[in-house]
């Protein structure tokens, strides 16, 4: 089992460009999450999904969109990147929302110039 | 609102020293509590957890006890190794709510 994988590992964007981060899990988990990690702020939830075809906003959703067309995939989109979106992005998945262990991907480091 | 408080660090210890990383939380109800660890260049992984008051979670020599009376879940290890150098995150889950993470405490263990 690969667990949770993320693509790409690193990306540099110019302000205004768009991109999509891909997260895939092979554990048949219902729940998936996107977080961003910034120095001094820990992990903040961007969006999450409680199942295929569903998405919901987290703590910091502005400037991001997500889609969960297949159970194993959760995509995070930036339509018009801003320097404030420079961060490390982590995807996670879990069997149950909140109670159970979350399994994290290795992260995507994004730099917006 | 609900929150988790832990020191950011870095905490620098010599090998074989005793480790304590404090974690306190503010939450309603009866949350589950977690410690996650992030090694350099990797994602977070669960280190230990406790789901009810007075439970003790343990793994790889680390321990933490769920103290409801003090709303705390302090992480301890009797003898740290260089390989324990990482960032440690305290977190809680209040049931059908999102998991709230602390800011993370960076631990550096020197030989």
Image (cartoon, helix red, strand yellow):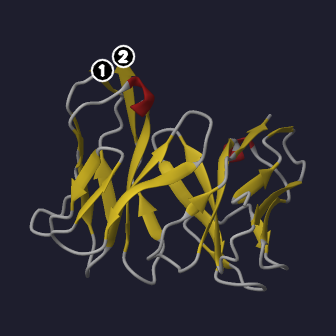
How many residues crowd around disc 1 within 10 Å: few (fewer than 14), some, or many (20 or more)? some
In this rendering, the answer to whether B82 lies above or below B54 is above
Asked if the residue at tag 2 contacts the one at tag 1, i.e. Cβ–Cβ closer than 8 Å, the answer is yes
Is residue A19 toward the left or the right of residue A53 in the image?
right
Residue A63 got which mark? none
Please give the name of the residue rendered at 61% of the width and 41% of the height, measured from the top-left corner. B42
Residue B110 got which mark? 2
Give the residue furthest to the top: B111
Residue B15 got which mark? 1
Q: Identify the image quadrant of residue A22.
A: bottom right
Is residue B29 toward the left or the right of residue A17 in the image?
left
Q: Secondary structure at mark 2?
A: strand
Is residue B61 toward the left or the right of residue A40 in the image?
left
Please give the name of the residue rendered at 9% of the width and 68% of the height, measured from the top-left corner. B69
In this rendering, the answer to whether A50 lies above or below A104 is below
- Whichever of labels 1 and 2 marks the residue nearer the N terminus, that label is 1
């Amino acid at each position: 089992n690969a667990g949770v994988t993320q693509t790409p590992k690193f990306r540099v964007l110019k302000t205004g460009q768009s991109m999509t981060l891909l997260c895939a899990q092979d554990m048949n988990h219902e729940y998936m999450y996107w977080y961003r990690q910034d120095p001094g702020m820990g992990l903040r939830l961007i969006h999450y999904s409680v199942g295929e075809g569903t998405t919901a906003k987290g703590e910091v959703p502005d400037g991001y969109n997500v889609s969960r067309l297949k159970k194993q995939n959760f995509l995070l989109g930036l339509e018009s990147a801003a320097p404030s979106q420079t961060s490390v992005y982590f995807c996670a998945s879990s069997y149950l929302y909140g109670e159970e262990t979350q399994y994290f991907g290795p992260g995507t480091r994004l730099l917006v110039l | 609102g609900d929150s988790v408080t832990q020191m950011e660090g870095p905490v620098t210890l010599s090998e074989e020293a005793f480790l304590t990383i404090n974690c306190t939380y503010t939450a309603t109800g009866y949350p589950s509590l977690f410690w996650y660890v992030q090694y350099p260049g990797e994602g977070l992984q669960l280190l230990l957890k406790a789901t009810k008051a007075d439970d003790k979670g343990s793994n790889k020599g680390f321990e933490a006890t769920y103290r409801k009376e003090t709303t705390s879940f302090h992480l301890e290890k009797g003898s740290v190794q260089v390989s324990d150098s990482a960032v440690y995150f305290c977190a809680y889950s209040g049931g059908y709510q999102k998991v709230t993470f602390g800011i993370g405490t960076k631990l550096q263990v020197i030989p």
